[in-house]
Amino acid sequence: MTHFLDFIESQVLLLDGAMGTQIQGADLKVEEDYWGQENCSEILNLSRPDFIRNVHHKYFAAGSDAVETNTFGGSFLTLGEFGLEDKTLEINKRACELAHEAIAEFAHDGRKRFVVGSIGPGTKLPSLGHIGYDALESSFTLQAEGLIEGRADAFLVETAQDPLQVKAAVNGCKIAMKKKNITLPIMVQVTVETTGTLLVGSDIAAAATIIHALGVDVMGLNCATGPQEMSDHVKWLSQNWPRKISVLPNAGLPELHQGHVHFPLSPDEMARWMERFLKEDGINVIGGCCGTNEVHIAALNAMLEKQVAGKKRPAPSARTFHWVPAVASLFQQVELRQENAILAIGERCNANGSKKFREAQAAEDWDTCVDMAKEQVREASHTLDICTAFVGRNEINDMTAMVSRLRGTVTAPLVIDSTELIVLEAALKLYGGKAIINSINFEDGEEPAHRRMELAMKYGAAVIALTIDEEGMAKDVDRKLAIAHRLHDFCCKGYGLPSSDLMIDPLTFTICTGNEDDRKLGLWTLEAIERIAKELPDIQIILGLSNISFGLNPAARHVLNSVYLDHATKRGLTGAIIHVSKIAPLHKIPAHEVQAAEDLIFDRRLPTQDAA
């Protein structure tokens, strides 16, 4: 049996054209055909199965290898807008059955054909606060269950306009698959507007970073524009996205002619564009969106059949891509490995570390809190650590207040910092970007770490992991290294987290106490960084930098932090939680101050002199 992913691995797959174009072009009656539910195309699966089956038949006859089900608006919530929520399972199941019935009419030719379950975005954008995550996920879960019952071969989350909606849809599919004990491929197609971004402002790199972390099998583009306007984004995917790619454009940009929407791209023009994408960009799945019909699909089929003599379908063209491990805000991607720099995690939006932030939070002066976040971005923080935990405050409410404001106002990705699982999940349900969870450790054994990794994998987050185990914080080099390996095995081998998304913090402690036992703590951390970087080269290594200088006056702290960061970076550090504006390059620090800091870091003392 040829499975969907096996097919697109070996040959280009031709999907169908637009279902909506076929429906809108037909003479259907509101009362008779739509059962009085005008514009609810999904009701036609029940009221006019003959019509929907015939649409699929036309596309298969034109050469499609797969058709999308008539379920674009088939989620519980969207059907609920027509009072049809109770028919969610029935409508989605029947839609798949109709597509299979159309396939049966072509059984004589021996070709393998597929049914792809269409899941549209619905009418509410969670990143704009239109709807909560839980309601959206539940809605998509029920739809996916119906598609599974109807024997869909794959899911297609399409026309995606908001990455948080994508998370809800993908997770809904996963929940349904687990319930039904089945595994199907998941495709996600985003819609990039003529502005160059998704409707909520995400660029293609941000969208890809977020979607990649969800483990989907295929990413692509559909709707909004024609192939010409998609070409730069298709090229980006070709050069960067590491998995399969699909492209389903409109038949050109829509135009208004005498009060009617017209799509200007002819079938032959569509075929020429798609041939270019196939040859230059290594696309795996092609088809059409708004304005395309069976004539467009026939032109695409003819183009494919001429590619390789004697074969119905050509193999996808080889392509070379370079995937960059990254996190993302709702708007943009931030690489985890910064060129000639570390990943700077802004530390000031932390109720335990910043008096100004804590006081603003206590007064619920959220404008000041947001301004502090924006100021850190202006100072060149790449990401922002957000911690609202403080005695006497409701941490969930405060974290919700911060994330719901920051997600649409700052371009830097967020680091969700809490020891409470419920707070982490509440924040992740609000955030459409690819966040970082801060943090996991083994202080209370592996069970709490298991729960946090489940969140990370579900919501597509990177993870900060501290070298702490059941015996406490690791101070010497060997223990730091051993726990780092344990964390890597736990997160990456156990859960499938990409090594590049694991950010190990080998811990640094103050070396400013004057106690003999503390004098080599900074040096041991440097040595641990070097060994971890050598033995686990693909992970990130970060530090909460300010711990090293705790106890000194502000001026001395700035010097020691700057000098220590320089040495840590040279040993293999890739990121740090810091106050960027308080870090100075060494050439701007007087030589004698650098010397004093290094004497302290490396515990260099004369018999009669104490460097501390």
Image: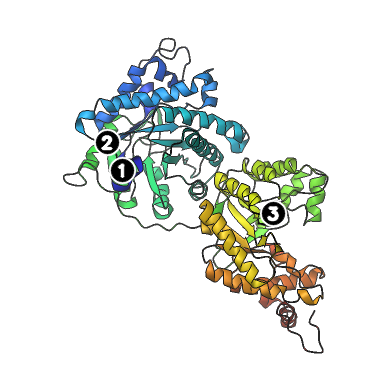
Instruction: Indicate whether 470 appears above or below 558.
Output: above
Instruction: Indicate whether 183 appears above or below 452.
Output: above
Q: Amino acid at mark 1?
A: Phe
Q: Which is nearer the N-term, disc 2 or disc 3?
A: 2
Asked whether, in this view, residue 104 is left or right of residue 262, the answer is: left
Please tell me whether mark 2 sits on a helix, a strand or a loop: loop
Give the CA separation, mark 1 to mark 3: 46 Å
Residue pointed to by mark 1: 7
**Which numbered mark, 1 or 3, is in the foreground of this view?**
3
Residue pointed to by mark 2: 112
Q: Residue at x 79, y 71 (%)?
A: 555
Q: Is residue 334 visible?
A: no
Q: Is residue 215 visible?
A: yes
Q: Residue at x 68, y 42 (%)?
A: 422
Q: Are marks 1 and 2 in contact (CB under 8 Å)?
A: yes
Q: Are marks 2 and 3 in contact (CB under 8 Å)?
A: no
Please tell me whether mark 1 sits on a helix, a strand or a loop: helix
Callout 1: 10 Å neighbours few (<14), some, many (20+)? Answer: some
Q: Are marks 1 and 3 in contact (CB under 8 Å)?
A: no
Q: Which is nearer the N-term, disc 1 or disc 2?
A: 1
Asked whether, in this view, residue 138 is left or right of residue 157, the answer is: right
Q: Position of residue 87 (x, y in %)?
A: 49, 19
